[in-house]
Image: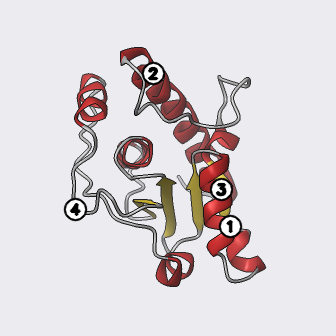
Amino acid sequence: MDKIRLLFVCLGNICRSPAAHGIMQELVDREGLSGRIFIDSAGIGGWHIGELPDPRMRSHAADRRYALMHRGRQFDAQSDFDHFDMILVMDEENYADIKHMAHNDKEMQKVHYLAEYLCHHPQENTIPDPYYGGVEHFEYVLDLIEDACAGLLETLKKKNHLH
């Protein structure tokens, strides 16, 4: 059976998308589903290609026992739409940018807001960028990402009969 391929996308691939990548990978590993679900992340811009995630995000994630070791990469419309089943964006700007790069309806249908899978934060419809914020911003974004990734995994398990 083919792997389900997930790509998390934010603006620079140094805060939100690598956090979602690391958190989702941890959840998938805990469930013993790493053989069934492949996870990656990317940024819309290429400013941080090859870099580790923002040190603040790595520190806050480490406090929650997540190791964020992904090296930044830029979204590649030529290959990423073909390679991934779901492209999960963080906010309206990310959504508009990725949709604009889609070549057809099939590709456009792969683009989803990660916040669609929030279970415990119904007031939120995006995952805000903590980059210019303080400690509380990073902590809140991690709360949102943990919630959304858990909801996404439950959805994938039900939809794809994963055990």
Residue 102 lies, with reference to residue 41, above or below; the image says below
Between the residue at mark 3 and the residue at mark 1, the CA separation in whole angstroms equals 6 Å
Indicate which disc residue 95 carries. Answer: 3
Between the residue at mark 1 and the residue at mark 2, the CA separation in whole angstroms equals 27 Å
Q: Residue at x 25, y 35 (%)?
A: 58
Residue 48, image quadrant: bottom left
How packed mark 3 is, by other alpha carbons closer than 10 Å (few <14, some 14-19, many 20 or more), is some
Nearer the observer, 119 or 78? 78
For marks 3 and 2, the one nearer the N-term is: 3
Q: Position of residue 120 (x, y in %)?
A: 65, 23
Amino acid at circle 2: His
Task: Give the residue at mark 1.
Answer: 99
Between the residue at mark 2 and the residue at mark 4, the CA separation in whole angstroms equals 25 Å
Instruction: Tell whether 122 sits left or right of 130.
Output: right
Amino acid at circle 1: Lys
Instruction: Tell whether 45 sits left or right of 144.
Output: left
Q: Residue at x 26, y 22 (%)?
A: 63
Circles 2 and 4 in contact, beta carbons < 8 Å = no
Task: Give the residue at mark 4.
Answer: 50
For marks 1 and 2, the one nearer the N-term is: 1
